Image: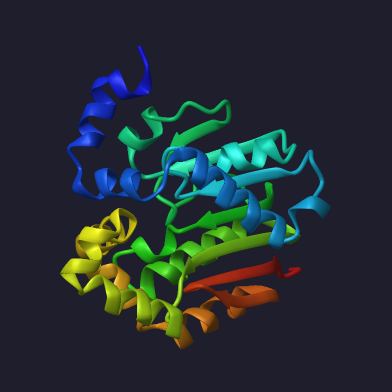
């Protein structure tokens, strides 16, 4: 039975956000995007035997990208059993709340989050909790990578175009993005409005190596502080 035929996938197909996401980006497009992000974060220089945690991993696009880059030890964690059940990649995965990571202290070399932190219910409280757990899980000097939406002029322009019905009808990807934003508006807008707080929380726990914005995204790379 293919993933699209499974009962779990039928459940996912009834979720408006998931349906919009599949219209916005195919799994293959997502994987290529994740590879570009990881390479930009320095992944070509990482040890291929590193223990990597892929948080908020969803259906596993990030893990597939990491495997494509040659990494052998990737563990995905996500709060949603139905998303994990839809995975087709070969990485290990587990149901877990990233605010309470079920991993040993200083057991990971690298932690990656691509588009999960902005779904947290409360900022900065939940963000602080997640980042504290990530810092605990990383070995001293371990690498943390996060890519999340960010308030930039480009993103403001995209949001403005999303409000034009004719543009949404003419551009299916734009309509899909608009639908996704509508279904996550509370957490999405709270995240975008908290940039200073978010960077402060990140820099409290990690030595910043990179914090750049591009096309409405923050690309953050930091290393765990030594005890």
Q: How is the image coloured?
A: rainbow
Please tell me which residue lies in front, 12 or 138.
Answer: 12
Q: Residue 152 in the image: x percent, y percent?
A: 45, 83
Q: Residue at x 72, y 70 (%)?
A: 225
Quadrant where the C terminus is found in the figure: bottom right
Residue 220 visible here = yes
Q: Residue furthest top?
A: 1
Q: Indicate the quadrant where residue 68 lies.
A: top right
Please tell me which residue lies in front, 12 or 32.
Answer: 32
Q: Is residue 4 above or below residue 15?
A: above
Please tell me which residue lies in front, 97 or 8.
Answer: 8
Q: Residue at x 47, y 74 (%)?
A: 216
Q: Residue at x 79, y 38 (%)?
A: 49
Quadrant where the N terminus is found in the figure: top left
Residue 102 visible here = no
Q: Indicate the quadrant where residue 151 lies.
A: bottom left
Q: Residue 28 in the image: x percent, y percent?
A: 51, 39
Q: Is 54 displayed left or right of 98 in the figure? A: right
Q: Residue 199 in the image: x percent, y percent?
A: 53, 81
Q: Indicate the quadrant where residue 65 lies.
A: top right
Q: Is 119 displayed left or right of 211 in the figure? A: left
């Amino acid at each position: 039975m293919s993933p699209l035929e499974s009962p779990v996938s039928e459940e996912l197909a009834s979720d408006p956000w998931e349906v919009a996401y599949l219209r916005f980006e195919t799994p293959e497009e997502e994987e290529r995007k994740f590879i570009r992000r990881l390479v930009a974060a320095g992944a070509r220089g990482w040890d291929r035997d590193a223990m990597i945690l892929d948080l908020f991993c969803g259906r596993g696009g990030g893990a597939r990208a990491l495997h494509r880059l040659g990494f052998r030890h990737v563990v995905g964690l996500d709060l949603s059993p139905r998303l994990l059940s839809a995975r087709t990649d070969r990485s290990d995965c587990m149901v877990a709340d990233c605010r309470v990571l079920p991993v040993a202290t200083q057991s990971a070399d690298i932690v990656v989050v691509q588009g999960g932190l902005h779904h947290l219910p409360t900022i900065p409280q939940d963000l602080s909790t997640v980042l504290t757990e990530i810092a605990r899980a990383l070995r001293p000097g371990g690498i943390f990578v996060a890519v999340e939406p960010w308030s930039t002029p480009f993103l403001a322009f995209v949001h403005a175009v999303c409000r034009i019905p004719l543009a949404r009808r003419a551009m299916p990807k734009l309509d899909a993005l608009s639908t996704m934003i509508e279904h996550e508006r509370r957490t999405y807008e709270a995240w975008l409005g908290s940039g200073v707080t978010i960077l402060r929380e990140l820099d409290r726990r990690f030595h910043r190596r990179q914090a750049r914005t591009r096309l409405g995204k923050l690309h953050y790379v930091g290393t765990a502080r030594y005890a």
